[in-house]
Image (spheres, grey):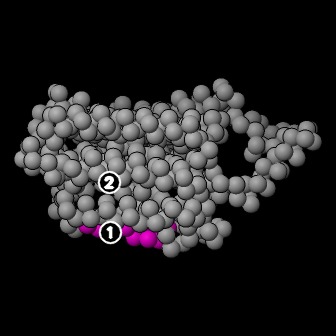
Amino acid sequence: MSTATHRSPLTDWTVVVPVVALVALVFSWGRDLPSLAVALVALCLAGAVLAAVHHAEVVAHRVGEPFGSLVLAVAVTVIEVALIVTLLADGGDKTSSLARDTVFAAVMITCNGIVGLSLLVGALRNRVAVFNAEGSGAALATVATLAVLSLVLPTFTTTKPGPEFSTAQLAFAATASLALYGLFVAVQTVRHRDYFLPVATKRIRKEAARAAAAAAAGEEDEHAEPPTARAALISLGLLLVALVAVVGNAKAVSPTIERGVADLGLPYAVVGVIIALLVLAPESLAAGRAARRDRVQTSLNLAYGSAIASIGLTIPAIALATIWLSGPLVLGLEPVHMVLLALTVVVSALTIVPGRATLLQGGVHLVLLAAYLFLAVSP
């Protein structure tokens, strides 16, 4: 007779950690934290990231691809926008370029960091990482168009001096960004959904065959059975809690980050890079785990979907926020960043077109990310 006891789901770490992180956020919000408190908040932040990845995978398993990737990308980006607007409202003129720095950092981290990591993991496992070139190519084209419209053109427009949009230009960029984002989501989830589904590798086909055999024999297959609708809804709620905790705790430790950046004599743009790294941590972990399971297309959906959402939702939100925010809004990239963006788009196109990649392509993307991070610290 078994004496094993069953733990209550309410005591599982994936439930407890987001709640604890949210409590830490409540007690730390708006306060000048001592070093010990900052360390505790950072620990809660790390735990919330891991919990967010778990719940995102539960939701993704229930709704399937590409909806699962879309849920995580949109949820993270919406809360990221709230964080940017909050910092813009609190920071004064020194944060005039924060939106640009954070959005561009998100583009470089997703298109080079997450993509490079995913291709590297996929190629290490199967020698060649395979994915759907049609879907990934469409996503890359959307990222490139959004980035140029929102981050490159302000440097060259002449209606307003400096790398800024006039009110009419900002309204156009916001409308175009939102329209492109909506069109991409419609194509990804409805009209051409099959372009964004994982390519059937040998391992995926074996898993499908094993699941079909188990179903035919009346056996349970824990890997094939999706969670119930109730479990998925609970995970969706906990995912939102975890993401609020991630971004909120990142905001709570941001004064310490800003002081550290200033003490080290680094450019203020490094703050935007750090914020983007923290906020995109759930997507990075989720993409790495998907690539390890031979689902490189899922990883690319997360990467490019996050980049599209980061621009397509942030620019319209910032455009609305300028109604009550005072001070300049610098969106135009500096020349060195435009060069990195152009190189990223060219390299990404060469990576995506064949529909398969090796260790070399993954390494090239990671080197581009390293170059961006180095130049952010040492411009």
Q: Is residue 125 visible?
A: yes
Residue 348 occupies quadrant: bottom left
Measured as percent of width and height from the top left, residue 126 is found at 66, 68
Q: Which residues are magenta?
A: 362-375
Q: Is residue 36 visible?
A: no
Near mark 1 (Cα within 10 A), the count class, few <14, some 14-19 or many ≥20, is: few
- Write down the residue under mark 1: 371
Q: Amino acid at mark 2?
A: Ala
Q: Residue at x 13, y 38 (%)?
A: 166
Instruction: Pick whichever, 68 or 134, lies toward us.
Output: 134
Quarter of the image for the C terminus: give it. bottom left
- Residue drawn at the location 70% of the way across and 30% of the way down: 228
**In the rendered view, would you say 114 is above or below 29?**
below
Measured as percent of width and height from the top left, residue 108 is found at 36, 57
Which residue corresponds to the image point at 25% horizontal and 60% vertical from the top-left?
338
User: Which amino acid type is marked by label 1?
Assistant: Ala
